[in-house]
Structure formats: structure tokens, C-alpha cells
Image (cartoon, grey):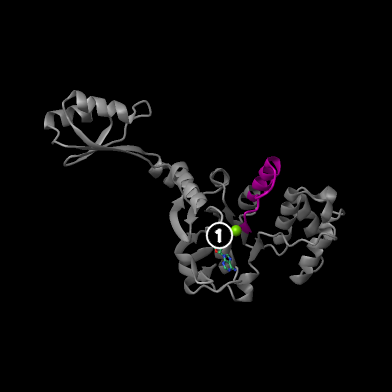
Amino acid sequence: MSMAISINNISKTLQNRKVLKEISFDVERGDIFGYLGPNGAGKTTTIRILLGLFKADSGKLEILGHDINESETRRKIGFVLDSDGLYDNMTALENILFYARIYGIQESGSKIDELLEMVELADRAKDNVSTYSKGMRQRLALARAMVHDPEILILDEPTSGVDPSGQIEIRQIMKRLASNESKTIFLSSHNLDEVQRICNKIAIIDRGTIKIYGGLEGLRKQMSKRLFIIKTTTDVPLQLQDELKQDPGVGLEEINGRELIFSPPESTGISDIISILSGKGIKIEEAIKKEDSLEELYSKILKETEIL
Ligand SMILES: Nc1ncnc2c1ncn2[C@@H]1O[C@H](COP(=O)(O)OP(=O)(O)O)[C@@H](O)[C@H]1O
Ligand SMILES: [Mg+2]
């Protein structure tokens, strides 16, 4: 079966700036896919391309195996953009009815009640949206996006600007939609914590480039290593190499000539390794600490963005 979303080497230039640089990823059916990146990374631009609102300069995009410009494909997508697009002076019910009519959905009364129930707004259905909190608005926008029962939901930072308890509610709704109604969800976010809570697959985008992409579990395992790379000025004698290899507290993993790679337990610091080596008369030229967790990587990306 085709992928829910398959994007291949897509690039986009806006006002002479390359905003997306050959990005590629696949979203499988049933995924809650987290599209993570700081402000200005290119998330909204990607979403506009996914929805057919922007045309990519190059590359290939398929939604459920089809072109996004086919009207049948469009109908299989529900979306909430970064501005919620709700009508303030209409009630929640009227907002959804209005949308249902655009999709040509008739006799939608009970379906709409169900949707409002799902986003826990049934008791506020007849209030004007102008009286809603940001979190309530986002929930209503989610219900509206579901009116034509789409297979894929594309949500642009749905919890951004929502208070913490409101964020929890929105995340629960997204989880329910994925598990109970087997919707595929594509969710953009600048919050690693959020993405880790609900997504099974992620891509991290930074200044138009995909930095990391894959299943969350696998990525976490793969990246949870803390490595110390130590370069020595002289060769380490074989006997000492064996000794170091056999000491689990040292965690010597690899020797490439005069470069030693350690992956010790938390309790061992880089200074401990240095003093062990010095104690054996080994001189050290360089010692590098490499912390390869998702958190480290993302906080580095965030810091770099702040500087720009
Ligand atoms: N219509 C546009 N014209 C020119 N530049 C744009 C336009 N939309 C976005 N950009 C620029 O593209 C980059 C990515 O923006 P965007 O996709 O909105 O990022 P994100 O959603 O991740 O915050 C930013 O530098 C932004 O200023
Ligand atoms: Mg955005």
C-alpha cells in the first residue's frame, strides 16, 4: 500500500532564499509523525506544499499515492493551519456547519454533535467563538478539520500558544484520533517534549534541511550514546588496551591507531578516563566529549537559531 505522505527531494525558494533544501521523508499510514523544528525552519512552508497551496520548485510529492491536486486526494486530508481560520462571531456549531457545507456534506447534525463531543466542546456548542480560549479554538479547529472524515490530518503547531492544560487536552485528542479512528497525523511542532510524548516517527528540520529522520524509538536508542574521543601522542600498548577493554567502568569501545573511543557508564567522567591513561604514562593530545542524544542535538539547533 502507498505511503500516506511521501516527499522526495523537495526544494522551495521564496524571495531568493532557499527555504527548503531537498527535503525527503515518508509518513506511513497510522503514523503520528512529528515535524520538529525551531521558528523559521521551514515547517509551515512544507505544510503549504503538502496541501498544494505552494508548488515545489523541484522534487516529488505523493499523498496516498496520488497527486495533491486531484480533488479526491484533497478530500482525504483535513488540516489546521497556523491561523485557525474560525469565524469569531459565529458559534462553534455554525463554524462547523459552514465548513460542512463547503464540503457538500448534508444531514450532518449527528456527525457534528459527535465531533464536538470528541473535542469536549459539546456544552459550549452554542457560544460564540469569540468567547473561547486559545485551546478551545484549536480543539474546535480540529473538529472542523474532521468534518469530511479525512484519512490524514495535517496540523501546524496545534498546541502553540495554548496553556499547559489545554496542550494536554489537544494531545489526548490527537492520540485518540490516531488510535481509535486510525487517522494518520502529521503534526508540526517546535517542542521536542511534545513530539516525544505522542509521535512514533519524527523528522527534525533546521533552516530548510532535514537533520534527523526516523522512528522515535530507534533514534533514541541510536542516539543515546555518550562518547569520549581521546587522541594520544603515543601508541597505547596492547596489554593496556586489553586492560582497558576489560574494565566495564572505562567502556573502551574502539581503537583507531592513536584515537580511542570510550562509551562509559554515567558515573565515569572524561576526567576519570584522562587520569587513568595519564596514570599509565600515556600522553593525551586531545579529548573530545560527544553527547549524542536527541535533546542535545535539538538544543544545539535551537541555540544556533537564536544566534542567527
Ligand atoms: N511567503 C513567504 N515569502 C518569503 N519568505 C517566506 C515566506 N514564508 C516563509 N518565508 C521564510 O521561510 C522561512 C521558513 O518559514 P516557515 O516555513 O514559516 O517556518 P516555520 O513554520 O518552521 O516557522 C523563514 O525564514 C520565513 O521567513
Ligand atoms: Mg510555522
Mark 1 crowdedness (10 Å alpha carbons): few <14, some 14-19, many ≥20: many
Residue in view at x 44 percent, y 54 percent: 213
Decide: is 246 above or below 146.
above
Q: Residue furthest bottom?
A: 70
Quadrant housing residue 22: bottom left
Any atom of ligand 1 within 8 Å of the CB at mark 1? yes
Please count the marks in the image: 1
Decide: is 145 above or below 11.
above
Q: Is residue 199 visible?
A: yes
Quadrant housing residue 237: top left
Residue stretch rendered in magenta on the structure: 155-174
Front position in the image: 217 or 159? 159
Residue in view at x 31 percent, y 35 percent: 263
Residue on which disc 1 sits: 43
Q: Amino acid at mark 1?
A: Lys
Along the horizontal axis of the image, is 50 left or right of 10?
right
Q: Quadrant of ligand 2?
A: bottom right
Q: Measuring from the top left, give residue 134's x and y in whole percent.
A: 74, 50
Along the horizontal axis of the image, is 190 left or right of 267?
right
Front position in the image: 290 or 116? 290
Q: Is residue 108 visible?
A: no
Decide: is 126 above or below 279.
below
Q: Would residue 166 be counted in the magenta stretch?
A: yes
Q: Residue furthest right?
A: 126
Q: Measuring from the top left, give residue 76's x and y in whole percent.
A: 63, 67
Q: Measuring from the top left, give residue 253's x and y in whole percent.
A: 26, 37
Along the horizontal axis of the image, is 83 left or right of 239?
right
> Disc 1 on helix, strand or loop?
helix
Residue in view at x 49 percent, y 56 percent: 205
Q: Measuring from the top left, give residue 80's x and y in whole percent.
A: 67, 60
